[in-house]
Structures are given as structure tokens and as C-alpha cells.
Amino acid sequence: MRAPIGKLANSEEGTAVLELGLTIPLVFVLLLGMIDLGRGYSIKLQLEQVAQRSVEKVMNGMADRSQLAAIKAEAASAAGVPASAVTTNAWLECSAAGGGGTPTYYNYPTDDDQPCANGQTSRRYLRVNIVKTFSPIFDFHWAGSNPDGTYTIAGATSVRTQ
């Protein structure tokens, strides 16, 4: 009777199945983590593309900086976020006198009538920033997560309009 138990204890049959059973959950969790990471990166790319499309209207002459509200509404609609999640900024940059030093910035629309001084180069810019929350599959509250377990993802672009 002792011989069959000793033979069974020394048998290595089935160890591959046992090892596979131990590693499958780890591989499955890694696969889901990669899928989750891909989903988050896809959302970031989508937000950046929406921001770029919204400033293309300015570049193509279809809109100007006076239509920041329309650009904001269109970007929010395309990204599927509320208008409060989109910020648009326009500003005028005047080069420093003599080409050195720090340039002067004027915000639109309050300082839009402010011209650059003689000898300064003017440049006008527009920036669109879109923020969206991402809920991952796993709720681990890792670094950078919000208190509710979501992550804030932003997509932004800027363009020089003059």
C-alpha cells in the first residue's frame, strides 16, 4: 500500500497544468491592464484631435479669435463633454524691445486693442484645452487618480494666428 502513495508523490504528471492554472490569472490581469491603458490613451488622442480640428477653423479663415465661444461649443460637442470642460485662450505677444528680455503678453479680449510698441514684433495665439474624466476597469486608486478612482485626461493644442 505504501508503494502506490510514494509513486504518486514522486509523479510529475500534471505539473504543467497546475503551473498554467497559477499563471492564467496573472496574464489575464496584465491583459486587462493593457486594454485599460490603451483606452485611456485613445481618449487622450481623441481630445487632442478635437482640439486641433477646432483651431483649424481659425487657420482656414473660417473663424477668428472673436468667435472663441463658438470654437468652445464646437469642441465640447465633438469631444462629448460639457462646455465647462473646454477652455479657449487667445493672447497677443509683443517681443521685448531690442529683441532681448521677456516678451509682453496681452489677453484677449480685454487687452486686444493694446498695440505693440514701435519696433516690437506682434504675434497672436489661440489655445484650446479639453478635459475629460476616464474610468478604468480596475479601481486601484493609483498615482494620479482622482478621489473617486477616475483619471483626468487633457488634450490641448495651440496655434499662431498672426
Image (spheres, grey):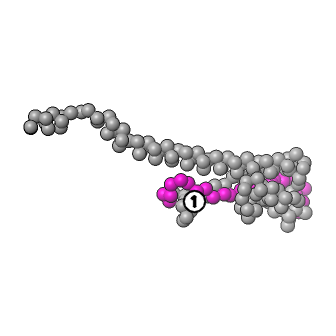
Identified at 13% across, 35% down, the residue is 4
Total labels: the figure holds 1
The front one of 51 and 92 is: 51
Identified at 15% across, 33% down, the residue is 7
| Residue 45 picture location, percent across and down | 67, 46
Q: Do we see residue 146 in this rendering?
A: yes
Above or below: residue 66 compared with residue 45: below
Residue kind at label 1, given as amino acid type? Thr
| Residue 6 picture location, percent across and down | 13, 36
**Pointer 1: residues within 10 angstroms few (<14), some, or many (20+)?**
many
Q: Is residue 102 left or right of residue 135?
A: right
Identified at 88% across, 54% down, the residue is 64
| Residue 55 picture location, percent across and down | 81, 50
| Residue marked by disc 1 | 150
Location of residue 94 by image quarter: bottom right
| Residue 52 picture location, percent across and down | 76, 48
Element type where label 1 sits in the image = loop
The front one of 2 and 55 is: 2
